[in-house]
Amino acid sequence: MELRESNLEKLAQNHFDVLVVGGGINGAVCASALAAKGAKVALIDKGDFASVTSQESSNLVWGGIKYMENGEFFLVRNLCKSRNHLMKNYPSTVQEIRFFTTLAKGFRHKPFFLWLGTWVYWLIGNCYTKRPRYLFTKKIAQEEKEINMSNCAGGVEYSDAYLHDNDARFVFSFIRDSINRGAIVANYVESLGAKREKNTWVSEIQDTISQRKIIVRSKVLINATGPYVDEHNKKTEQTTLHRHVLSKGIHLTVKKITPYHRVLAFFADDGRLFFVIPMGPVTCIGTTDTRVEKPNVTISEEDREFVLDNVNQLFQFSEPITKEDIIAERCGVRPLVVKGQVSAKKGWMQLSRKHVVETHEKEAHISIFGGKLTDCLNVGEEVAKIVQKLGVPLVYSKYQWYGEAPSSVRQEFFHQARLMDLDKLTHKNASEKISTRIWRRYGPRAFSILEEIRSFPQKAQVIIEETEYIQAELELAAQQEMIVKLEDFLRRRSKIALVISRQKLKESPGLFQACQILFGEKAQIKYDEYFGEGLE
């Protein structure tokens, strides 16, 4: 909390080159790219970082094979290149995973035709992943015994990528990088609107925790508020050619369905791809695609029934999965870009998932519409070029602002970890070695965790039962990850709330100890706030 409070003071005291409103993936990469290239950057979010669309994805980094059906080969080509770029630059986090896709009899395309499509997809993606393969029904039955074969016509297997941790954690890595490069960042700070005075944007913002109002001045204003872009543009009196229409998607987390580490893909009743995604000790299933009018959405009974009905039809379980088996739920909107009124009249499933950056040069205002996590590095680069054209000098314009630390730094970390026998302290139920997990999550910041464990070996102790989070990394998170609420840690800095039920968390004696590490004397208040206790 000290970092956040310090940054709030700096927001009021400084004049910035750029103010980024919105801390989802688009805002995070903009702040990281601009700060690395030499701009004086501020970023705010009215909630926690990645707390809207960016925390509700399928945790997949894919080239969009389904967009080929709409003839969007240029989009697919760009997304595949972006996927490859992420895999190359974030090898610890963005990793290849196989998609095991089966087709029902009578589907609009034959399995052989789909197999040919996967080869085209592989070629479009520069043959960067493993080759596709055709799946005869016998092979499907052998390799995935739980799949209901009664209506199966065959299938294919191909590759894309996934996030080893969760989507929100990946977004936060860019937030943290921007902080390391001098950006002034704060969560739970709402933009109340802004006005252009001479050559400066004067933005009024409010700390939603203390209700304190602050004035921030910047040369350029970037609206990266995701599904709220149109709403925020009204606050700043911006008129744009593009706008958003919104699609609601949900995912349900249930017990592990299959032991194999691959994505099972089917076509649901509505024709949309339906995924069964491995997520550590559990499985994530979904998604839906329902047009909605507003960003604030909730899961309906109909949504749950749709997902559960589909998964029960596609698998032959001894007992069907019911609502009682749901461990966690995710629900969010996808902001889809349309231009004027014409594009919105397209078939709902045919709307493009591309991103659009619209600039009002005279007023030095940028709006970012749509986009996918897969394409995030391109968004950062594109916005940096626009900001430079708007008159902000970027001294390090050629600097590569993304990617994991150099291999020499990584090698030094693992060398030190081996010398101190760190992996001997790995918890017996852990899914991977402690050194591998700490490096992936913290990069060079993991050296401070090594130092703490070297001095105090007991700090390698797991604090929250059924998780892998140790005391030393909780202490680091408390100092450096701007955690304001318990949900920030359980849902976004980690994926604990996605793999452990709320009731189990409440019963965990280690959770309150984690609260004490994260919040000190406010531990009870934060604990009660999360579980809704002691509230009128």
Image: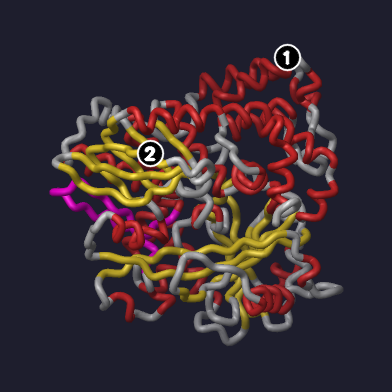
Mark identifier at residue 174: none
Q: Residue at x 64, y 79 (%)?
A: 302
Residue range (magenta): 352-372
Q: Position of residue 381 (x, y in %)?
A: 31, 42
Whether residue 213 sits left or right of residue 198 in the image: it is right
Circle 2 Cα neighbour tier, 10 Å, few/some/many (<14 / 14–19 / ≥20):
some
**CA gap, disc 2 to disc 1?**
43 Å
Q: Depth-wise, is mark 2 or mark 1 nearer the camera?
A: 2
* In-front residue for pair 362/340: 362
Q: Position of residue 496 (x, y in %)?
A: 70, 47
One can see residue 410 in this view: yes
Circle 1 Cα neighbour tier, 10 Å, few/some/many (<14 / 14–19 / ≥20):
some
The local secondary structure at tag 1 comes to helix
Residue 368 on the magenta span: yes
What residue sits right under mark 2 in the picture?
214
In the figure, residue 250 lies in which quadrant? Answer: bottom right
Q: Quadrant of the C terminus?
A: bottom right
Q: Residue furthest bottom?
A: 106
Q: Position of residue 333 (x, y in %)?
A: 49, 65
Residue 459 on the magenta span: no
Q: Are marks 2 and 1 in contact (CB under 8 Å)?
A: no
Q: Is residue 288 above or below residue 52?
A: below
Q: Residue at x 80, y 49 (%)?
A: 506
One can see residue 154 in this view: no
Name which residue type carries label 1: Arg
Q: Quadrant of the N terminus?
A: top right
Q: Pick whichever of labels 2 and 1 is earlier in the sequence.
A: 2
Name which residue type carries label 2: Ile
Q: Position of residue 36 (x, y in %)?
A: 35, 29
Mark identifier at residue 454: 1
In the figure, residue 488 lies in which quadrant? Answer: top right
